[in-house]
Amino acid sequence: MLFGQGGREGGIADGRLKRLVEELSAAVQDSLSESEQIAEVIAKIRAGGYDVSLVLNATIAIKKREEEPVRHAVRANDRLESSFNAQDIKFLKSMHISVDK
């Protein structure tokens, strides 16, 4: 299931972007199906007398980037530790973490 801009199912209007998301989805599926590590674990489970059905659900969220992200620097002892954009700040606030500007 693909979720595009605004969180609406199938909301990707840009044909090129939609193809890229489908390509990403196929690449993830291919990498899982070709993984030797996954195949080895499945073989061990089957050797134990069990059938295996692996079902994964991945959501690909697409959001247009802000034109010019607002950056807030976090300093400790006059050293730049890291920076956060507006979306980072919103997330941190939702977790009740304050960031001094």
Image (tube, rainbow, N blue to C red):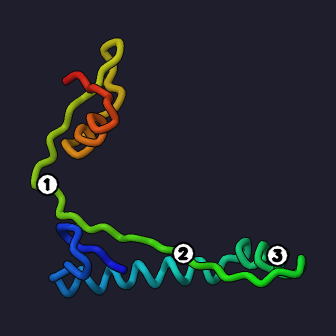
Label 3 vs label 1, nearer the camera = 3
Residue that mark 1 sits on: 66
**Rendered image quadrant of residue 52:** bottom right
Q: Is residue 80 left or right of residue 90?
A: right
**Rendered image quadrant of residue 61:** bottom left
Residue that mark 2 sits on: 56
Q: Nearer the viewer, residue 52 or 31?
A: 52
Q: Which of pointers 2 and 3 lies earlier in the amino acid sequence?
A: 3
Q: Furthest-top residue in view?
A: 77
Separation of marks 1 and 2 at Cα, in angstroms: 31 Å
Relative image position of residue 39 (x, y in whole percent): 74, 79
Disc 2 is placed on an element classified as: loop
Task: Name the residue at 52% across, 81% down.
Answer: 29
Identity, as a three-letter code, of the amino acid under mark 1: Glu
Relative image position of residue 51 (x, y in whole percent): 77, 84
Q: Quadrant of the C terminus?
A: top left
Above or below residue 82? Residue 6 is below
Discs 3, 1 touching: Cβ within 8 Å: no
Relative image position of residue 86 (x, y in whole percent): 19, 42
Task: Name the residue at 31% across, 81% down.
Answer: 20
Task: Name the residue at 48% across, 74% down.
Answer: 57
Label 1 vs label 2, nearer the camera = 2
Q: Is residue 42 left or right of residue 5?
A: right
Above or below residue 74? Residue 12 is below
Residue that mark 3 sits on: 45
Crowding near pointer 3: few (<14 within 10 Å), some, many (20+)?
few
Disc 1 is placed on an element classified as: loop
Separation of marks 2 and 3 at Cα, in angstroms: 17 Å
